[in-house]
Amino acid sequence: MASDANRPSDSSGSSRDEIRAIRLQKVEDLKQLGLNPYAYRWEITHHAAELQEKYTDIVAGQEVETEVSLAGRILARRVFGKLAFFTLQDETGLIQLYLDKKEIASGMAETDADAFEHLKSLTDVGDIIGVKGIIKRTEKGELSVKVREYALLTKSLLPLPDKWHGLTDVAKRYRQRYVDLIVNPEVRDTFRKRALITASIRRYLDQQGFIEIETPVLQTEAGGADARPFITYHNTLDMQLYLRIATELHLKRLIVGGFEKVFEMGRIFRNEGISTKHNPEFTSIEVYQAYADYSDMMDLTETIIATAAKDVLGTLQITYQGETIDLTPPWRRITMHEAVQEKTGVDFSQFTVLEEAKAAAKAAGLTGVDDCDSIGRLLNEGFEQAVEETLIQPTFIIDYPVEISPLAKPHRSKPGLVERFEMFIVGRETANSFSELTDPIDQRQRLELQAAKKAAGDLEAHSVDEDFLTALEYGMPPTGGLGIGIDRLVMLLTDCASIRDAIAFPLLKPEKMDTAADQAAP
């Protein structure tokens, strides 16, 4: 039998505006019939995935007389005279609706004598409906809800993409995430897993005696990282403020105040570039533990990430972009000097003269070395160029140059280095940790160096935070600090190639700005 067309039709040749006009007319038609196209509520007893699991064993042609009630969006509709089949999607998945004119006429005789005809002519793909009925497996083997009653809950005015199972325009997916979520179930799965990952981390830290305390987003001094801040202004107080670039300095104040285990998971804002690895606002967790050092934080990092993977994925053997990753602790630990020497053949620890180190770096093929003003920065340049992208399996790079670590404690046995690690996996930094600097005099000197760089035009350097230094002078116990990039961790555990796939609403230029830029391009 041929399918009946909608009257009037959402034909594939119609423009978006034409389809919207047709659907607006249907809204008016519904109102004229005394039917509300935008309902107030619907009582739900079951969800699609629950029904698919519960009734997996019933055979073709079998019906189960238990009434079910569910609601969701129409993703497909096929109408054949007195019989129709809709595909309904709710938050958990898909189920077929079996719509028989006789059954619906019987179930809805008192509320809408022409309910089946209205279903045929006034509903569209994209509409949200509620249904009540019984479970039936069709002769073709499709588990279905045999509908006895239905109600249009929300009339959709705009069409879904032509192929509802695939919205492929990447920019449009990010810009209209709500459509992306409707038509790409794997995207919903990513954000569901993201919620489970963050819940797992919080639950584990809670079990270990850590407490979460919120710190200010608006700050009078940007600090805790080398990053360019966003600047804003408070009218009543007549003062310039910064969106935080880290939660570090306020969480450390809490350690000074007597808390021994604190953390915060929240948004961080950095006025920097955008790439597959960077978004100007992102989520991180920072954890501080009194009487601990960076070795303790390595153990904590392994456990947090392995626990989240086990809780959410059920395994420590994961696949990322085709690469098998083993998250089983313990992970490899190697110093930055050793890692750079492995890849370049240069042992930067043997140099005391910067020019000699630069010559060796150039001979090893490193670029941009003339801009490095110390051997420590040269070492870091060698790491970023030769090592970072090769670290596929989880690896702790430990013992960093003091020049690039202004908040870390000097290494207890290696002059010129600090007790710091970064954890790399699939070529990306995912965690950062210090044995925290607790000497207020040393800390002042390092912050003053940062302030001098800011005065010289370094947009990522910051002023001296006098209140933080005052806090340190009251005394902070030995402390281990840890930061983990939640977005990058979600990317890893959900196999997302881009950070934009792990953030529900990534920052994008408005479409008009993109269009103007395209037109201006040569």
Image (cartoon, grey):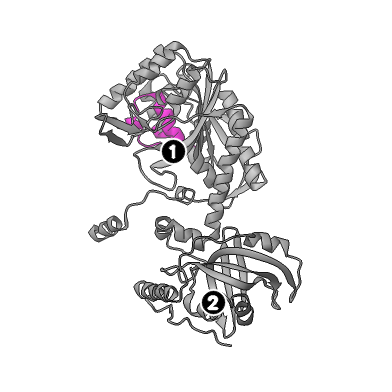
Q: Find disc 2 in the rendering and name its residue.
A: 112
First reached walking from the N terminus: tag 2 or tag 1: 2
Depth-wise, is mark 2 or mark 1 nearer the camera? 2
User: Does residue 130 sit above or below 258 in this rendering?
Assistant: below
In reply to whether residue 60 is colored magenta, the answer given is no
Q: Secondary structure at mark 2?
A: loop
Per the rendering, the mark at residue 150 is: none
User: Does residue 475 sit above or below 503 in this rendering?
Assistant: above
User: Does residue 340 sit above or below 66 in this rendering?
Assistant: above
- Gap in Å between the C-alphas at discs 2 and 1? 50 Å
Residue found 32% across the figure and 31% down from its top? 371
Q: Find disc 1 in the rendering and name its residue.
A: 267
The N terminus, quarter of image? bottom right
* Residue 195 image point, x, y percent: 55, 45
Circle 1: is it few (<14), some (14-19), or many (20+) Cα within 10 Å?
A: some
Majority secondary structure of the magenta segment? helix
Could you tell whether 100 is left or right of 397 in the image? right
Q: Amino acid at mark 2?
A: Asp
In reply to whether residue 364 is colored magenta, the answer given is yes
**Region rendered in magenta:** 362-387
